[in-house]
Image (tube, rainbow, N blue to C red):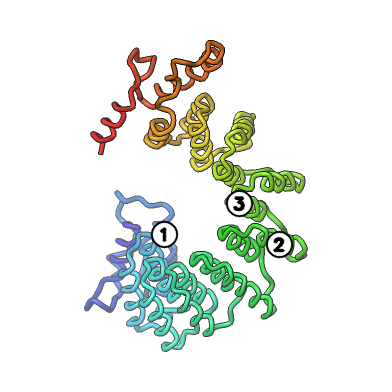
Amino acid sequence: MGQAEKMVRARLRAADGSTYAAASCSEIHCRYTDIGDAIEKAWCDPKPDEPPPLLPKRYVPNTRTYTILMKGYMKEGRVDDVVRMIRAMQNEPDPSSHPDIVTYTTVVSALVNAGAMDRAHAILAEMIDTGVSPNRVTYNVLLKGYCQQLQLDKAKELIRDFEPNVVSYNILIDGCILMDDSAGALKYFNEMRERGIAPSKVSYTTLMKAFALSGQPKLASKVFDEMTKDPRVKVDRVAWNMLVEGYCRLGLIEEAKKIIERMKESGFEPDVATYGSLANGIAVARRPGEALVLWNEVKERCEMSPPTLRPDEGLLDALADVCVRAAFFKKALEIVACMEENGISPNKTKYKRIYVEMHSRMFTSKHASRARQERRREKKRAAEAFKFWLGLPNSYYGSEWRIETMYEDDVGDS
């Protein structure tokens, strides 16, 4: 950004703070045939220690020149500079340098990204007043901004001003999800079809998401079935995963496992999102034995050559959480080792707190039978190893673990 900005500043020097004039031939010259080419080269191959390339002759900045610079400002979050560019363009004597639909849409996008919705709408009004007709892309950018800001009333007003397409309705459906309004999402989905607009696979999966997040997996399943019957779209892994998510959120593990089997039969291997949903569902259902089965499958795929799965933090943390709560310390250590191998920092503070709250008095009974003590011996070794990893007192230290010590440490840390 720095080199490109220097180039434009050399090329476009402010005369009175609002108008830019051409620089002289002695100021700029290089091998590029257009200043826009030189600026784009600066974006792609920045060399901050070198002076900006010079142009062989004087060039009047055109719309492309300004728009490229504006996009650079957008990437750096410099919204006010984006707006200044469009003001400079409006004062250019050459009509070819005046803002066009791409320029205005770039400014609207910058303001939407900054959450300045009133300013973004004002630019839209200004665009119309200057005779530049906004297209659906411009309106959809603004529509998405209103939905992201949870201003659904303004989004509903805006959609009356243009002819919406499937992207517009997908944005509105997603906005309803942000408002936890599955009924509204269904309303827009049906309205879209009534207007003769064919749903895309994004439409179907977004509506499925609305029902999944609101605890209505059966309705999500109905949308999925309808999607499979629509010849214009093709069911993908995202749709399968959303179906799995719907049942896992309620802890309906058996139903979710059946869907995963159907998913495999349809040629889709479970991915990190699939396993992550299942791990969270296992936690909700409080079925730690299922976590062991799932971890073995995940580990097997990670150890293949080449690996067919790269686990993420969400999946491994969910599995580790279940195992620690269930006192499966050996498996918990395997999982945190996998996290560290994949560059993920395990949340030791959380696991330490779980151990203190749930297992600190484990193996303290003096009345257990000899047979029971023998059965618990291996589990105790795993617990001691886990405490060693957590940094708690354990048999490896030759010191005694006391819950009072842990509480004192917590107070000191806070």
Tell me which label, 3 or 1, sits earlier in the chain. Answer: 1
| Image coords of residue 343 (percent x, y) | 45, 34
Cα gap from disc 1 to disc 2, whole angstroms: 61 Å
Which residue is identified by label 3? 245
Which residue is identified by label 2? 222
In this rendering, position of residue 259 left or right of residue 46: right
Which residue is identified by label 1? 31
Identify which residue is drawn at 55% across, 83% down.
Answer: 162
Q: Amino acid at mark 3?
A: Glu
Cα gap from disc 3 to disc 2, whole angstroms: 14 Å
Work out whether residue 201 can be spotted.
Answer: yes
Tell me which label, 3 or 2, sits earlier in the chain. Answer: 2
Residue situated in front as seen by the camera: 18 or 6: 18
In this rendering, position of residue 276 left or right of residue 48: right
Q: Amino acid at mark 2?
A: Lys
Rendered position, 99 above or below 236: below
Rendered position, 383 above or below 306: above
Local secondary structure at mark 1: loop
Residue situated in front as seen by the camera: 222 or 133: 222
Label 2 crowd bin: few (<14), some (14–19), many (20+), radius 10 Å: few
Name, please, the residue furthest toward the top.
Answer: 370
